[in-house]
Image (cartoon, grey):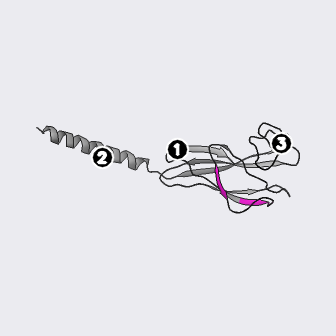
Amino acid sequence: MLSPHKTIAAAVAVAALAAAGVSIAADTATQIAVEPVASLSAGDISPFDASGVKAIRRGKAIPSGYVLVGQKVTNTRGQASAGAALYFRCPGEKRLKTFGTTGDRALASADRSYVDHRSTWVRSAPGVKGQTVTGTA
C-alpha cells in the first residue's frame, strides 16, 4: 500500500501528464481561408462608414460612381500567429479611397499608401490563439 505522500505525488504526476497531453493536442496549425464576396455598388446599403469618404455611410445607399469590393477572411489560430495577405484591385478605371471592415477580422496594414491607386495588398491581423474569427474587408 502507498503512503499518503506517494499517493498524492502519483496523482499530481498523472494530472500533469494529462494536462501536457491536452496542451500538445491544442497546438495545431493556424488555418486561414479567404473567399471573395459580391461587390456592393450604387443603390446597395453600405455595411460601414468609409473613413475619408463622406458619401459612404453605414445603413445608407451607396451613391452612383462608388463600388465596395470585398474579401471574407476566416482565421482559426493555432500555435502560430498568422494573418492573410489580401490583394484588392478596383474594377475598370476606379481608384482606391479607403478600407472598412465588418465582423471580427480587422485589417492590420496596407503595403503602401494606396489612395488613388488601382490595387494594393493588405494584411489581416491574426486572431486570439484557439479562436476562430471571421470578417469582411
Spatial CA distance of label 2 from label 1 is 24 Å
At label 2, counting other C-alpha atoms closer than 10 Å, the crowd grade (few under 14, some 14-19, many 20 or more) is few
- Residue found at the very far left of the displayed protein: 1
Which mark identifies residue 89? none
Sequence-first tag of 2 and 1: 2
Mark closest to the chain's N terminus, 2 or 3 = 2
Disc 2 to disc 3, how far (Cα)?
A: 58 Å
Q: Is residue 108 magenta?
A: yes
Please name the amino acid that badge 2 sits on.
Answer: Leu
Find the residue positioned furthest to the right.
64
In percent of width and height, residue 64 lies at: 89, 45
Q: Quadrant of residue 58?
A: top right
Q: Which of 106 and 89 lies nearest the eye of the viewer?
A: 106
Ranked by sequence position, the earlier of labels 1 and 3 is 3
Q: Secondary structure at mark 1?
A: loop
User: Type of residue at label 1?
Assistant: Gln
Q: Which residue is mark 3?
A: 62
Q: Amino acid at mark 3?
A: Ile
Query: What span is in magenta?
Result: 106-120
Q: Which residue is mark 1?
A: 131
**Discs 2/3, front:** 3
Residue found at x 12% / y 39%? 3
Residue at image coords 39%, 47%: 23
State whether the magenta stretch is mostly helix, strand or loop.
loop
Q: Nearer the viewer, residue 20 or 47?
A: 47
Residue, disc 2: 17
